[in-house]
Image: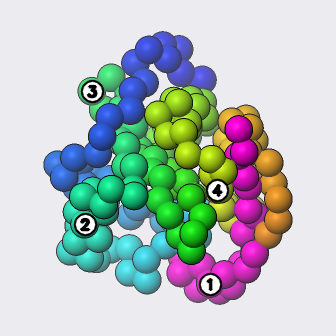
Amino acid sequence: MITNTSDLKLRRTAIADLDTLFQFQLDKEAGFLAAFMPKDPTDKTAYLTKYTKLLSDPTVNNQTIMLGNTIVGSIAKFVMEGDTEITYWLDRKFWGQGIATLALKKFLDLETTRPLFGRVAFDNFGSQKVLEKCGFVKIGSDKGFANARQTEIEEFIYKLDH
């Protein structure tokens, strides 16, 4: 667990953050757990193009997770097929310290859209715990092709109403 939670902050994601955030997605273990990745997560040009565009999209709320002066991850709200969803990614060096849970709680104070949905691979137990600790309830499941695994997998769907 992190000892000084006041060191954890969220701030609007800037274009300058994208290089660091891109590096996080190159972690194969993290990518496996995230499962639903781009076809080629090593394509930096595609990544920068996509996220530069998203930073100016008013329906997307992109935040960078900071621990002191260090970028440790990202969290965002976006709309897909009419549902407002969240996504987050934490540098694997910071897993298991309560950072993702605290970052999501802070994000939920900033982003008040409800209901809010989260989707997580069936075997990503850490992310499932984060959602549950923040009040999300598992409401179902779906199947989809996971590029990081090159197969179709089950994903759990979580919902936050309040």
Quadrant location of the N terminus in the rendered image:
top right
Q: Give the CA separation, mark 2 to mark 1.
A: 24 Å
Q: Which residue is mark 1?
A: 145
Task: Tell me: 103 left or right of 69.
Answer: right
Neighbourhood count class around disc 4 (C-alpha, 10 Å): few under 14, some 14–19, many 20 upward: many
Neighbourhood count class around disc 3 (C-alpha, 10 Å): few under 14, some 14–19, many 20 upward: few
**Residue 29 appearing in the image:** no
Residue visible at 17% across and 49% down in the picture? 16
Task: Tell me: 2 left or right of 45.
Answer: right
Q: Which residue is mark 4?
A: 118
Residue visible at 27% across and 27% down in the picture? 69
Q: Is residue 82 above or below residue 100?
A: below
* Magenta-highlighted residues: 142-162
Q: Which quadrant of the structure image shows residue 10?
A: top left
Task: Tell me: 54 left or right of 7.
Answer: left
Task: Tell me: 89 left or right of 57.
Answer: right
Q: Earlier in the sequence, mark 4 or mark 1?
A: 4
Q: Which residue is mark 2?
A: 53
Q: Amino acid at mark 2?
A: Lys
Q: Which residue is mark 3?
A: 69
Neighbourhood count class around disc 2 (C-alpha, 10 Å): few under 14, some 14–19, many 20 upward: few
